Amino acid sequence: MKNNIKVQRAIKDMTQEEIARKVGVTRQTINAIEKGKYNPSLDLAFNLARLFDMTIEELFSYGGESDE
Amino acid sequence: MNKLTKIRFLAFFSIAAFAAISYYTHFLPYKAVWLWFPILVFVDYWLNAYAKKRGMVLSDEMTKQTVGKSAWVTFQATIAAILLAIVYYDLNRHLCIADPRYILAYIAGFMGIVFLLVNAYYNKKSGIWD
């Protein structure tokens, strides 16, 4: 799973900590999602997309099987 | 590794070091070993309560998933270790003569160490400590 959270975060000038607080997860989870080490739940993905005023498809793209 | 984890490690190692020195210098009797567990639980509870009060998110879907995977691996490893011990070390015979408290303590210790190692591995892999 690929995502452009890092880009959107830079555009909005937000830190990982700020995003984590807004969507109710730890900063480490946002970091793991950005690095592609963790695939978020549908609930979290919707919350992230809503935070950036985007659709899930715009924020995340399926790039094949994950490592997990 | 976040600040809370660092403080937790520091607090726990400080308590463990004090306990070890106390026993080594005979400052405390060996029977007092059980006193340390409530102290550790209290420190852990207090740290969590303080962090929550400061608005820190302590657990989320990723940490729950990591702990769940670690617990499952620990359970499998424990069952495997018990079965191997029965087969290779003739534990059936030893169980009859050993104090059950020691057997429980060994199993608990094994589970604790395996859980810590596996959890540390999954934390590292999922980027929780980055």
Image (cartoon, rainbow, N blue to C red):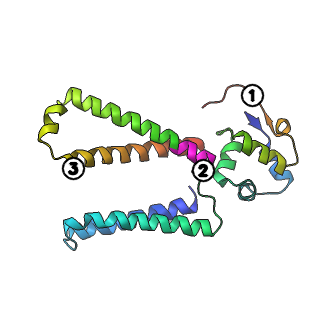
Badge 3 element: helix
Chain label for disc 3: B
Q: Position of residue B34 (x, y in %)?
A: 28, 63
Query: How many numbered marks have been drawn onto this rendered protein structure?
Result: 3
Dot 1: within a 10 Å radius of its alpha carbon, few (fewer than 14), some, or many (20 or more) residues? few
Q: What residue type is labelled 1?
A: Gly
The verdict on residue B21 being magenta is no
Q: Where is residue A5 in the image (x, y as percent from the top left)?
A: 78, 45
Q: Where is residue B117 in the image (x, y as percent from the top left)?
A: 43, 44
Residue B130 badge: 2
Contact flag, marks 2 and 1 (Cβ < 8 Å): no
Furthest-right residue in view?
A: A53
| Comparing labels 3 and 1, the label whose residue is closer to the camera | 3
Question: Does residue A3 lie above or below B20 as drawn?
Answer: above
Badge 1 element: loop
Q: Which amino acid does label 2 sit on?
A: Asp
Query: What are the residue bounds of the magenta stretch?
Result: B61-67
For residue A59, what is the image quadrant?
top right
Q: Which residue has dot 3 on it?
A: B101
Question: Does residue A48 lie above or below B41 as drawn?
Answer: above
Q: Which residue has dot 1 on it?
A: A63
